[in-house]
Image (spheres, grey):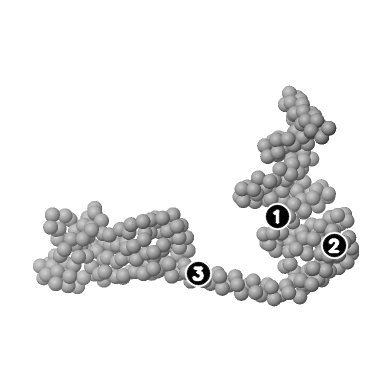
């Protein structure tokens, strides 16, 4: 009955933890269990019952069932190592040969027959997590590829109309552009670019409801290169018809996306949202947005003037005067530079 210490794998990395947590949530395994992921082999002993057998140093023991999980980035196999005698309070055990088992049974120290055990479905699945993850990734790749090919197959007949619409749009033939954008959309209703461009034409023509309808459809297409621009354009259409809350919602979506992407080039968006707050007479939030503009563009004269007016509305004349003075100084510096 040789003594063994439970082996632990060597190098645990952030990637391993992330993978095991993702897999754990997918399979219903607790994060605590999932967090014990390593490269190499991890031994686990499940307690079955206490026994009167003592270890070679007098340790209290219990009958357990041992299995091993073999991992590389995530578990890829699980081996059933059978019965062992675990050491209470320690991560170590004594192995049990069939001869040991029969000897202890004969002396009444182990039950005969031994209690049955089985590896749970969750443990079994977790022990093969790497293969499950790889299969899921492969399915996503194949599914995404099939979806993209299907999308391009549907879109192919719409492309000539879209290209024609772009040429006519650039040359100023807006009626022809709208007609060809419409044909492209009829062929592929999920084609975000012609929806966006047709929406912009509607907005510039003062057809704000039609613009909002097209821009909303463009947003719902969830094309990353279109979505934020469509939100910006839709905010302008909402502004024209006085839907200030919706203006603010669209501009906030753009600002939040920029924050997530760590893109600081949103001074103009903050300025537009600040003006929307002014129109709602929410001068506190307007001041906060104009302040963000000034942080991003310290020489934005228009932002100082806008914030000064908001301060004035809140009765903060000293702050308003300071901003007016800053705007005048910036204008003076600009005039001296161009003279």
User: Which image quadrant: the C terminus?
Assistant: top right
Q: Disc 2 versus disc 3: distance between alpha carbons?
A: 44 Å
Is residue 312 rendered to the left or right of residue 172?
Answer: left
Depth check: give the residue in front, 143 or 106. Answer: 143
Give the structural element (helix, strand or loop) at label 1. Answer: helix
Q: Earlier in the sequence, mark 1 or mark 2?
A: 2
Query: Which callout, 2 or 3, points to the residue nearer the camera?
Result: 2
Please identify the quarter of the rendering in which residue 147 is found: bottom right
Residue that numbered label 3 is attached to: 136
Q: Dot 3, how many residues are within 10 Å of its Cα: few (below 14), some (14-19), or many (20+)? A: few
Give the structural element (helix, strand or loop) at label 3. Answer: helix
Q: Horizontal and vertical percent for residue 26?
A: 48, 63
Q: Horizontal and vertical percent for residue 208?
A: 84, 55
Q: Dot 1, how many residues are within 10 Å of its Cα: few (below 14), some (14-19), or many (20+)? A: many
Tell whether label 1 touches label 3 (CB within 8 Å). Answer: no
Please identify the quarter of the rendering in which residue 275 is found: top right
Residue 182 visible in the current orientation: no
Residue that numbered label 1 is attached to: 228
Residue at the image point whose x is 37% and y is 67% from the top: 127
Q: Is residue 119 above or below residue 9?
A: below
Q: Horizontal and vertical percent for residue 129?
A: 42, 67
Q: Which mark is residue 155?
A: none
Residue at the image point whose x is 84% and y is 55% from the top: 203
Q: Outermost residue toward the front?
A: 339
User: Which image quadrant: the N terminus?
Assistant: bottom left
Residue that numbered label 2 is attached to: 169
Depth check: give the residue in front, 251 or 144. Answer: 144
Q: Horizontal and vertical percent for residue 332?
A: 80, 29
């Amino acid at each position: 009955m040789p003594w063994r210490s439970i082996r632990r794998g060597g190098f645990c990395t952030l990637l391993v933890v992330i993978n095991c947590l993702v897999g754990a949530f997918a399979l219903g395994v607790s994060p605590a269990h999932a967090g014990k992921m390593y490269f190499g082999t991890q031994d686990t002993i499940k307690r079955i019952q206490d026994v009167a057998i003592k270890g070679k140093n007098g340790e209290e023991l219990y009958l357990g069932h041992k299995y091993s999980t073999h991992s590389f980035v995530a578990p890829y196999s699980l081996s059933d190592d059978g019965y062992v005698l675990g050491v209470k309070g320690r991560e170590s055990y004594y192995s049990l040969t069939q001869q040991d088992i029969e000897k202890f049974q004969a002396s009444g120290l182990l039950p005969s027959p031994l209690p049955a055990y089985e590896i749970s479905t969750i443990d079994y699945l977790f022990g093969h997590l790497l293969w499950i993850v790889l299969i899921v990734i492969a399915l996503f790749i194949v599914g995404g590829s099939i979806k993209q090919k299907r999308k391009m197959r549907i879109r192919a007949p719409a492309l000539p109309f879209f290209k024609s619409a772009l040429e006519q749009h650039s040359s100023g033939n807006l009626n022809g552009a709208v007609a060809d954008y419409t044909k492209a959309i009829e062929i592929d209703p999920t084609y975000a670019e012609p929806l966006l461009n047709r929406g912009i034409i509607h907005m510039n023509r003062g057809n704000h409801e039609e613009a909002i309808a097209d821009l909303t459809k463009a947003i719902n297409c969830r094309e990353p290169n279109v979505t934020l621009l469509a939100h910006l354009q839709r905010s302008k259409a909402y502004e024209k018809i006085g839907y200030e809350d919706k203006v603010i919602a669209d501009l906030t979506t753009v600002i939040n996306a920029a924050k997530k992407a760590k893109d600081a080039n949103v001074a103009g968006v903050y300025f537009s949202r600040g003006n929307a707050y002014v129109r709602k007479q929410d001068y506190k939030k307007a001041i906060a947005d104009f302040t963000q503009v000034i942080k991003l563009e310290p020489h934005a004269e228009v932002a100082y003037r806008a914030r000064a007016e908001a301060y004035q509305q809140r009765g903060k004349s000293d702050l308003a005067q300071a901003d007016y003075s800053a705007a005048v100084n910036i204008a003076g510096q600009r005039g001296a530079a161009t003279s």
